[in-house]
């Protein structure tokens, strides 16, 4: 599973990256986590609000930090 966090490195972006990594690790998922910070790369996903969560190329969430239950659902756990 490829997980990408889209954002410029703000506090919310960093928080989303950490909670996503923690949730995926806790669930025992085989994943890679990539932080996408280049604005052109972010725009290629047609994302207008950050942070955003992308799982296997599909934008799952934009503009907020999900609850742990919501995050597990987005990761398919």
Image (cartoon, helix red, strand yellow):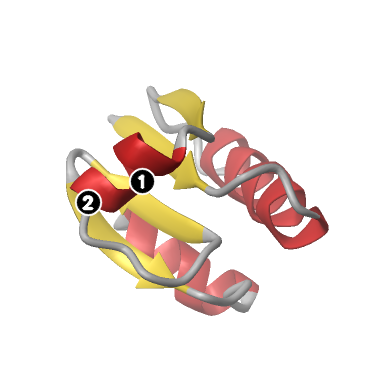
At 49% across and 44% down in the image, what residue appears?
5
Whether label 1 touches label 2, CB < 8 Å:
yes
Q: Which residue is mark 2?
A: 45
Looking at the picture, tell me which residue is in the foreground, 76 or 19: 19
Q: Position of residue 25 (x, y in %)?
A: 59, 34
At 63% across and 72% down in the image, what residue appears?
65
Q: Is residue 43 visible?
A: yes
Q: Residues within 10 Å of mark 1 (few under 14, many from 20)?
A: many
Dot 2: element: loop
Q: Position of residue 30 (x, y in %)?
A: 38, 23
At 82% across and 56% down in the image, what residue appears?
11
Q: State left or right for residue 45 relative to residue 52.
A: left
Q: Which residue is mark 1?
A: 42
Q: Residues within 10 Å of mark 2 (few under 14, many from 20)?
A: some
Separation of residues labelled 1 and 2 (CA atoms):
6 Å
Classify the position of the N terminus by image quarter.
top left
């Amino acid at each position: 599973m490829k997980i990408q966090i889209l954002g410029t490195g703000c506090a919310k972006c960093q928080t989303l990256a950490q909670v996503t990594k923690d949730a995926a690790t806790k669930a025992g998922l085989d994943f890679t986590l990539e932080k996408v910070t280049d604005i052109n790369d972010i725009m290629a996903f047609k994302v207008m609000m950050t942070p955003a969560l992308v799982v296997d190329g599909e934008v799952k969430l934009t503009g907020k930090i999900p609850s742990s239950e919501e995050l597990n659902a987005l990761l398919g756990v």
